[in-house]
Image (spheres, helix red, strand yellow):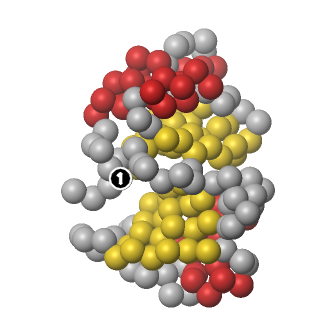
Amino acid sequence: MAQQIVELDVREMLNTKQDPFERIMATVQQLTEHDVLELHATFRPEPLLKVLGRQGFRHAIVEKASDHVMVQFYKSTEELPLFHLDNRGLEPPQPMVRTLELLDQEETCQNGTMGVEIWNERVPALLLPELSERSFQFQVTDEEEGTVRVKIWRNQ
């Protein structure tokens, strides 16, 4: 079964003073062991990070704006937190553009605290030299079902 990113946006619930905890936990229960939950919230959900951490979930956080925080929860033994980007189904050059935009964000991969894992349908031949030129390290893994995983990070 191919891994997928399951998006859940609770910003509207938070803005109207509703508690999204039950909805979040119901979504977590539906995840397969390879899925990633991408939660959109209005703030960094510290208590939720702890609750899901105790259940074996790792997380990666990207702040899109002062009132928009994306947190991805996933199960992994990797030491470096990874933000996942699903580029499957996109026409070139969109996979490369999306990846570079995420890498260009100030906190993503810039200080060695977080990496990025992209899921493409094929090896991103034009992206790899660009990553090297920007001093990123990467690892390419050709998975089953037409998915190529590329882990990208910068050494500290």
In this orientation, which residue lies closer to the viewer: 5 or 75?
A: 75
In this orientation, which residue lies closer to the viewer: 76 or 16?
A: 76
**In the image, is 89 to the left or to the right of 139?**
left
Please, is residue 60 above or below residue 153 in the view?
above
Report how many numbered discs are placed on residues in the image.
Answer: 1
Q: What's the amino acid at mark 1?
A: Gln
Quick check: can you spot residue 94?
no
Give the structural element (helix, strand or loop) at label 1.
loop
Q: Residue at x 48, y 71 (%)?
A: 150
Q: Residue at x 62, y 25 (%)?
A: 46
Could you tell me residue 131's position as x and y percent?
Answer: 64, 79
Splitting the image into 4 quarters, where does residue 119 fall? bottom left
Label 1 belongs to which residue? Answer: 4
Please, is residue 117 above or below residue 132 in the view?
above
Splitting the image into 4 quarters, where does residue 90 fall? bottom left
Q: Residue at x 62, y 66 (%)?
A: 153
Splitting the image into 4 quarters, where does residue 29 fall? top left
Could you tell me residue 123's position as x and y percent?
Answer: 43, 82
Quick check: can you spot residue 118?
yes
Report crowding for label 1: few under 14, some 14 to 19, many 20 or more residues within 10 A (C-alpha): some
Could you tell me residue 132's position as x and y percent?
Answer: 66, 83
Please, is residue 117 above or below residue 127 in the view?
above
Q: Residue at x 58, y 21 (%)?
A: 47
Q: Which image quarter is the C terminus in?
A: bottom right
**In the image, is 109 to the left or to the right of 33?**
right
In this orientation, which residue lies closer to the viewer: 155 or 131?
A: 155
Q: Which image quarter is the N terminus in?
A: bottom left
Could you tell me residue 100's position as x and y percent?
Answer: 65, 70
